[in-house]
Each structure stands twice: as structure tokens, then as C-alpha cells.
Image: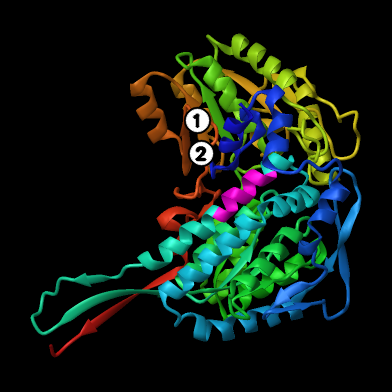
Amino acid sequence: MAATWYGLMCSRLPLASLLHFPKSVRPVLIRVTMDRVPAAAEGVRSASSFLHDKAYINGKWVTADSGATIEVVNPSTGAVLGTVPDMGEAEAQSAVDAAYKAFQTWKDTTAKERSALLRKLFNLIEENKQELAKLLTAEMGKPLAEALGEVNYGSSFAEWYAEEARRVYGDVIPTPMKSRRLLALKQPIGVAGMITPWNFPNAMITRKACAALAAGCTTVIKPAEDTPYSALALAELADKAGFPPGVVNIVTSSRTKSAEVGKVLCSSPLVATISFTGSTNTGKILLKQSADTVKRVSLELGGNAPFIVFDSADLDMAITGAMACKFRCSGQTCVCANRIMVQEGIYDQFVDKFAKAIEKELVVGDGFDGSTTQGPLINKAALTKVDEHVQDAVSKGAKVVTGGKFHEKGGNFYQPTLLRDVTTEMRCLKEEIFGPVAPVVKFKTEEEALAVANSVNTGLAGYFYSKDLSQIWRVAEKLEVGIVGVNEGVVSGVEIPFGGVKESGLGREGGKFGIDEYLEIKYVCMGGV
């Protein structure tokens, strides 16, 4: 059996999670997929070759001009893992200048040359994926097997765009005049500024950067202040792969200076496009700051995903989907189920089965413990926000079925929580929770479910379970989201267009669509033929 689970885990299925596997198999799975390590500190030591205390600009490892640093903390233990430079406006501008200079030659490389470098990067990630996973768990906290799933997912973008680099096709347009020939060329847009989140510190960089590099763009990347090491590790591998100086640049900064770095990327006329994954509020600021230079902006912002279970659903399938969708990464994903809506005919049965699954399958602990399925929240602010959502719901009539408190382990741990009798007036339905809390609300009709699902200003992902084929078509078409999971709770993949509608963002990442964000179309009219 262990070999079977190993094959599943090591495949590049999207964001593989232990939640899909029986509890009894998880320790075996950990041991089979990688050398098990008992503590975060040991995991970091074994990945020490990737622990960089400097940022990466123009092919060099550099400090902040001021010499200032920020500490990187393991959210599970509170231990300081190390420091990275706390950079601001000046260093960001240096990175932009380096990227712009490098673009002048990088844009002229052939698609085949760019493809070969991305393939080398893919191979290097594959060779080092266990160490990259340990590093990711140490700085972000997610379970080790889940971290390995992310690294596999991240490497798949290097592989995919190594192939897509050679498939950027233009067009020959039929001409209305015999003396003319009409062409449409696709060319790289220029320097791409990228601001990436802490919850997927490896894959969110590769999903953006590999598409840009394949198109012929250069990059300036600002990773999240909580998780800079995964970004710097990727920079080391890009350097080893042979990407020229200035093509990949990493600028690290604290929360205090992040706004400075972001403003440089948005306001500089040398930067052609901004790609950001994060909160809706921050995305709006970046969009406004980019207006003066009329940049192209790609935004993957907050979600408030509905997860609808109709009376006709396969209940066991819906429970499995809800577990994977809600509790992956301890609920800290933009596409996780946020508003779980269950039709009245099966409401009580669903809540009962869901509670039993939570209590049986979820284990809270350090990510380096092989039995853990739920790591810590990223920091104290996140922990406080999650508890506030729970307390607000309870004060307005919701009932705690299981969990509902800070975990006895202390630190940044919170109990996996199930709330029933939730109403639309509660914060947990109005706002994105971003934590291990599952609020379940009852509905009567399909029309009511759609009205509630579409009542928010976000529209990233939505899920529903039904065996009624007519209903499946209706609901899939009417949900106001960019991503729909039908009888499926985990929908990400390298091949698909990832992005939202309404205030959940602009543009798409991944698949054949993702490279278009970094390409311009040039029309050429040739006369006198």
C-alpha cells in the first residue's frame, strides 16, 4: 500500500494534501516520500544550502543599503530561522534598472533558448524538491507532505512554460488589398514586477515568473515578508540553471517597507506589468498606483468561495470535498470553501458527518511531525482574526459543533472548527476567514443558494455538489466566479486558467492563458507587395 500512496504523492497532482489519505497511512507516506525529520530546526539545517541571508539583484547576492534586516520566524515554534535584508525604494529601483537593462538582450533570445533554461530550472527543482519542501515547512508551517505537494506543483509551471515558450504563435491575417500583407506578432511586454503571497511561497512565484520568462520578459519579485526563503532558493536555482544577471531579481522587505517597494514597481515607467496575488485591498492600491503609467495589471485577489451541497449530492463525496477544500493549508488559501451552504433536506446529516470527519481525520501540530495535517496559522494577527470570526458567529446565534477555541498547543495554532446555524449576517459569511473554520448555513431552494453565493463582491472560486445533470449546467453557468468545482473540492492545476471575476482580480494565470499576460500583440502592415 505504501508504494501506491507514494506514487500518488509524488505525482504532480495539484497541491497534494494528506487530507485525501487515510489517517493510518499518513506516517507511512511521510517516511516513504522523504526522510522524516523530528523538528523544524533539523529540517532547516538539512536545507541550509538554500538559507540565504541576502537578496538577489542583477545576479549578485546583496544586502540592504542601510544594512537593515528582518527576522524570519517559524510560525509553528516561534523560533527565528534567520534574517534577510529589509530593502526599500532604492534597492527596488536598482532591481528595476537591472531588469530593464537585461531585458534589452533577453527579449532577443530565441524561444528555444528560453525553453532550455526553464527545463534546466525544472530539473533543478525536481532534484532539490525535498530540501525545498523542508525549507517551505520551516518558514510557512504547512505539513511536510503538503509542502512537497506545493513544490511539485511549483515545478510543474517551470516544465509547462518550458514547453509553452515555443508555442507563442502570431498570425497572418487575410488582406483586403492585393498589395498588402498583414501580420500580428506577439512580443514580450517588458519588465514584470511581481508581488507574491506567503501561503504558497514556491508555487505562486513559479506560476508567475516562469510564464514571464518563457515570454521573454525579465522579473523583479517581492516575496512576502513572512516567507522569503523559498523565493531566494528559487533565485539560487535560476542562477544555477544559467539565467543571465538581471533576468530574475528578488527584493526582500519588511511590512513597513513593502509599500515602498510596491510603489516603485507600480510607478516606474521601466516596469511594463504588475502581477500580484494577495488581498483585495492591497490589489486596489496597486491598481491605482499603476494607473499613471498605464501598466498592464494582473491581480489574483481575495475570495469568499461558496461550497453548495444540494439534496441530490453524493453526501460522502461532498464531505470528502469539503475536508480537502476547507482545511488544506489550515484554511489559508484564497480558493478554500468559505461559505458552506447545505440544502435543508440533508443539512443535519451533513453537519453530523462533517463533524465526525474533522474529529477523526485532522491532526494539529508541527509540520515536521508525520501525523500532522493542520499546521499553524501564519502569525498572531491571523490567529486573532480567525477567533474573532468564531466569537462573532457565536454571539449571533451560531453553535460550535467542534473546535471553536485556540488550540491547547498554544502559539499560532487554532482548533479545526465547525459552526452550524450560521446566517448571512455573521462576519464568517461576509468576510474571507483564511483559517480552519467551517461555517455551515442552511438553504431551501437552488435560487436561494445562488442568490447568497452571488451576493458578495468577490468571485474567485465556487464549488457545488449535485447529481442532477440539469442543475449542474444551470448552477455552473450562474455562479459568478472564475473557477467552478463540480463534485470536486480541489481544482488547481498547471493546465488551467486560474483567476477570478468582480473584485477577485484581473487576468488569468496558468495553462496556455498565463503566458498571454506577458505578451503584446503588434500589428504589421506590409505594403507594396
**Disc marking residue 491:** 2
**Residue at the location (66% across, 51% down)?**
279
For the residues labelled 2 and 1, say whether their Cβ atoms are less than 8 Å apart.
yes
Quadrant in which residue 222 is drawn:
bottom right
315 in relation to 128, above or below: above
Q: Is residue 298 above or below residue 355?
A: below
Scheme by which the image is coloured: rainbow
Chief secondary structure of the magenta portion: helix
Q: Provide residue 195's location: percent of width, then percent of height.
A: 65, 62
Quarter of the image that includes the N terminus: top right
Q: Quadrant of residue 34?
A: top right
Tell me residue 494's x, y (percent).
Answer: 49, 50
Residue drawn at the location 56% of the way across and 60% of the way down? 122
Classed neighbour count for the residue bearing mark 2: other residues with Cα under 10 Å, few (<14), some (14–19), many (≥20) = some
| Magenta region includes residue 186 | no
Q: Residues within 10 Å of mark 1 (few under 14, many from 20)?
A: some
Query: Circle 1 sits on which residue?
Result: 488
The structure residue drawn at horizontal position 43% and vertical position 70%, both measured from the top left corner, is: 519
- Mark 1 lies on a secondary structure that is loop
Q: CA distance from mark 2 to mark 1?
A: 7 Å
In the rendering, at what x and y percent does residue 304 appear? 60, 38
52 vs 520, left or right, is: right
Q: Amino acid at mark 2?
A: Val
Q: Which amino acid type is marked by label 1?
A: Glu
- The C terminus appears in which quarter of the rendering? bottom left
Q: Give the total of numbered labels.
A: 2
- Residue at the limit of the structure toward the left, as seen here: 178
- Disc 2 is placed on an element classified as loop
Range shown magenta: 147-155
